[in-house]
Amino acid sequence: MPNPVIFSVNGPVVKVRDTNAFSMMEMVYVGHCRLIGEVIGMNDTETTIQVYEGTSGLMTGEPVEPTGAPMSVTLGPGILNNIFDGIERPLKTLESVSGAFIGDGIDVPLLDTEREYDVTVKVKTGTVLQGGEAYASCQETSAILHLCMVPPMLSGEVIRTVKDGKYRLNDEIICLKDAAGQEHSLTLCQRWPIRRARPAARRLPPSRPMITGQRVLDTLFPIARGGAAAIPGGFGTGKTMTQHQIAKWCDADIIVYIGCGERGNEMTQVLEEFTALKDPRTGKSLMERTVLIANTSNMPVAAREASIYTGITLAEYYRDMGYHIAIMADSTSRWAEALREISGRLEEMPAEEGYPAYLPSRLSEFYERTGAYETLSGREGSVTVIGAVSPQGSDFSEPVTQNTRRFVRCFWGLDKSLAYARHYPAINWTSSYSEYLDDLAPYYEKQVNPKFVQYRSEISTLLKEEQTLMDIVRLIGSDVLPEDQKLVIEIARVIRVGFLQQNAYHAEDTYVPLEKQYLMMKLILHVYRRAQELMRDGTALADIAASGIFELVIKVKYDIPNRQPERFRTLTQQIDATLDGLRTQKKEVL
Amino acid sequence: MSIQYFGLHSITGSLVVLDHVENAHFDEMARIVLADGTERTGRVAMLEGDKAVLQVFEGTHGLSLTNTRTQFTGRPMEIPLSGDLLGRVFTGAGRPADGLGEVVSEKYGDINGQPLNPVSRQYPRNFIQTGISSIDCLMTLIRGQKLPIFSGTGLSHNKLAVQIVQQAKLAQDTGAEFAVVFAAMGIQNDVADFFRRSFAESGVLQNVVMFLNLANDPIVERIITPRCALTAAEYLAYEKHMHILVVMTDMTAYAEALREFSSSKGEIPGRKGFPGYLYSDLASLYERAGIIEGTEGSVTQLPILTMPNDDITHPVPDLTGYITEGQIVLDRGLEQSGVYPPISVLPSLSRLMKDGIGEGYTRADHAAVANQLFASYAQVQDARALASVIGEEELSALDRQYLEFGKWFEKLFLSQRFDENRSIGQTLDLGWALLSLLPKSALDRVDDQVLSEYYRPEAGRALIEKERGSNG
């Protein structure tokens, strides 16, 4: 059979006729300039390949070269504090090769092969190693210790090791002899196919929240470590902003930020900001424990489709070392559109709105790769995904939002009208939900305060009540409401402005620890109860409002620093004194 | 190279198919010569075996299966580039349209461009003063930004675009030259003429490059018009180190051309018949705005689109909004009540604003006044909605104050004359004076220190007195 050559070219889709040189999902080189591609379909006459780079200038008859391996990424030290494109090509290296604009057919090593790491070898000759066990470690960045692990499917006896010392990525560290007597040379890195989940020993139930320091998330709609959340919202509602905030402040060990089909300037901003931001946990730059994957909207669409898988594969690799990883995927809608675009080029039968019928199964495959796990070597690690969804026309009934909803347990719906009123984060408290509440209740009760969950539900009830009352107010005005209902509206305003609204640009308010979140809820509910008492005794709501205590509570988020929770006590006393004053005045009048 | 192919295999819409083709490259250009000697340009849209599918930019009218000779050029679509582009007028396909002859090129540029590496970008931070209060204060334009105007048919978007071009001024004048690239896609002759006249009157015509694809020009050419314009803009910005403002109008006509072309290729349609790749396609235009780290020069985009039926959820404004860094939304209600520019403040936004305002850029209090104006104006809308149900008399005192504030805000802040150029200082002071019409306790987005410095009820009252005085 002759060597495979290009038969047809249509955008990113290339077809090859009459060959059986390829296997499904195999990575191939297309054309004389060796563009990277992947086999995505075959039948008796044609093999279909999607190309991850621009196909301008390709000719029919150019060669297509098989590589014998599925589309894979290189896993090893050098991933963190770096920025890659959708197929793990380092953008900084691309810049040095092709300048400010990204050219095609550039073949660069995925990870730095020249850099030397201080490697500590953890095994001796004769040790028997199973898949997933660490044989060496090195300090990848100042924040993260990198473990080199035996690839999951391999096991055997160590027959050779090197001494501790400085080694480069592709230097042999140990040599393993498997049961069949075959020798395997293990270096600092390994390859793994992006579309296959890395195996783990067993899945653990969600039991601990991923703390983000954002009140509306941590208190009202918490996400578990190893959970999955969707942030749907029209343009300008703050999806990206919310993801930035979570990435900056959440208590994950490592952040994987995937810019999938989004703006170039946004990735530049993330890179600049995260580099400059001092990580509260390590005191170093946040980039030391972050990896960025940038496949902006004008970069090739097939690589956009792959970027999500590349990101989650990197995350699983660090999970296997026993780290907790948070993935920000911005935006999964662009990924779905990439699927649709390629599906269209393949002339597949479309389902809803032109999306392929396999959209739900692809989405579920992706979201099911999240979770808290016991790894093969008995460590505990997790992968949490926060996926932004950009619904067309802000319509949550469109296929990507609807299908995503089925596979995530946390839904943070962004609301245009809140965003227009500059209520940030614009997370709508009626349409959002978290199914992790019950799983996480024991943690909150034990670690923060036994009353936390009770207070949360009281706050939530007040907001719900306000919504019902506002329906009436919108029709007939607020004057007709009885006093106690007016109080509900007033307290709900305090909750909305003082608790739910959070200022990302304010030094104290950008991140709030759980304890302060609890104390704020407690204070708000305390004021509510005291006001109810006073009003039962005949004090008018207008007088209580005039005393300024509601404004005082609203400004607590700015006035009491995170590190001085004891000041809540004095503030409560001060408010009590004010309210007692109102009561005595009332009595004097009588 | 000199192989010529006689005749065609088939013709559908603007697509022609050639067979027995050898060595054609995907995306390359071809020259099609008709029997009468006229020449058309085509681009390879698909290759399959020995068949090549070409899209013909000037349209396929007059073509038959036998009257053509086709020759492949071996090059992608390119336009000649040089500093002499300034002051010239071209067709939508980049050919001279002003009778001044071909451009003497310093180099040729592939109109499709290449994606800018995110690592090589510089994050835009420099404020461009447009002299229009609502834009400068509430949706600040930043150099290197893409900020579209969402408009409707019959609204004053063209006037606004011209005013921005005339008044735009960089806050930190770096000495680099400023120029405008204008791309017209499917707009009427009159509109194109309005822009040309306005540029001439304000004396900037020598610094404008125009690419005109008018409403009666072929739609396939419309698809390459913005690409020609952006290629010129990138050349002037990154190689001639100028600050370029690209005005592209009308993006809806562009997207419709894309739809027409897509359907003639028999592609599976997405929403409202637009092709599934509309997002990627629009992004390949909008993402060409930006600044390259370490070089002087920038590309700022001001695309204009008309929302069909004023519907902001229509695919074109919707997808645009997801790609661009904010939007300026015009409102028919405001236009009808005589407000110019009729900018609807609440849905408008500039995403890059937060890093380009404040101390060192505009003024330290900018963020505070902008946030508070947004929040208070949102309250105005609520109060108006309530008033329309229960009547103004029944409103609470505070709600009545909001109505009053809203009225003056629209009259004094939003409205300004076509030739009125307000400095950022004037704009911010005006904002504070108007906010001072509201009680201090209602201004909950500003911290007390800033508030005590800028809250001046007497300034607000004086402003209204003056306005009443000038009318009486």
Image (cartoon, coloured by chain):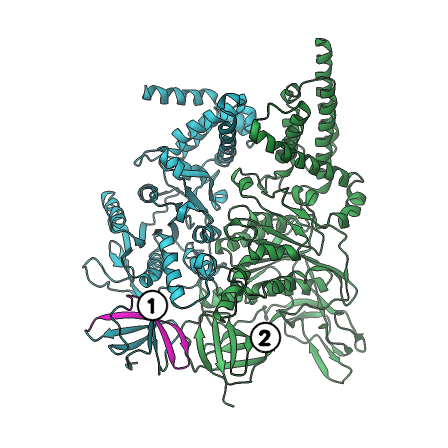
Which residue is under mark 1? B13
Q: Residue furthest bottom?
A: A1
Left or right: residue A46 versus residue A281 is left
Q: Is residue B84 visible?
A: no
Q: Position of residue B58 (x, y in %)?
A: 28, 66
Q: Amino acid at mark 2?
A: Met
Which residue is at a point 52% across and 64% down the rendered structure image? A340
Given residues B41 and B219, the one toward you in this image is: B219
Quarter of the figure with residue B185: bottom left
Chain for numbered disc 2: A
Q: What segment carries the magenta color?
A: B37-60
Left or right: residue A481 versus residue B263 is right
Label 1 SS: loop
Q: Which chain is cyan?
A: B
Q: Quadrant of the C terminus of chain A?
A: top right
Tell me, yes or no, whether the highlighted magenta stretch contains residue B341.
no
Q: CA distance from mark 1 to mark 2?
A: 36 Å
Q: Position of residue B74 (x, y in %)?
A: 34, 75
Prevailing secondary structure of the magenta residues: strand
Position of B407 relative to B17 (above/below): above
Left or right: residue B163 versus residue A183 is left
Display colour for chain A: green
Q: Position of residue A224 (x, y in %)?
A: 72, 52
Given residues B107 and B71, the one toward you in this image is: B71
Label 2 SS: loop
Tell me, yes or no, whether the highlighted magenta stretch contains residue B48.
yes
Q: Position of residue A302 (x, y in %)?
A: 52, 67
Mark 2 crowd level (few <14, some 14–19, many ≥20, 10 Å Cα): many
Which residue is under mark 2? A25
Q: Amino acid at mark 1?
A: Gly
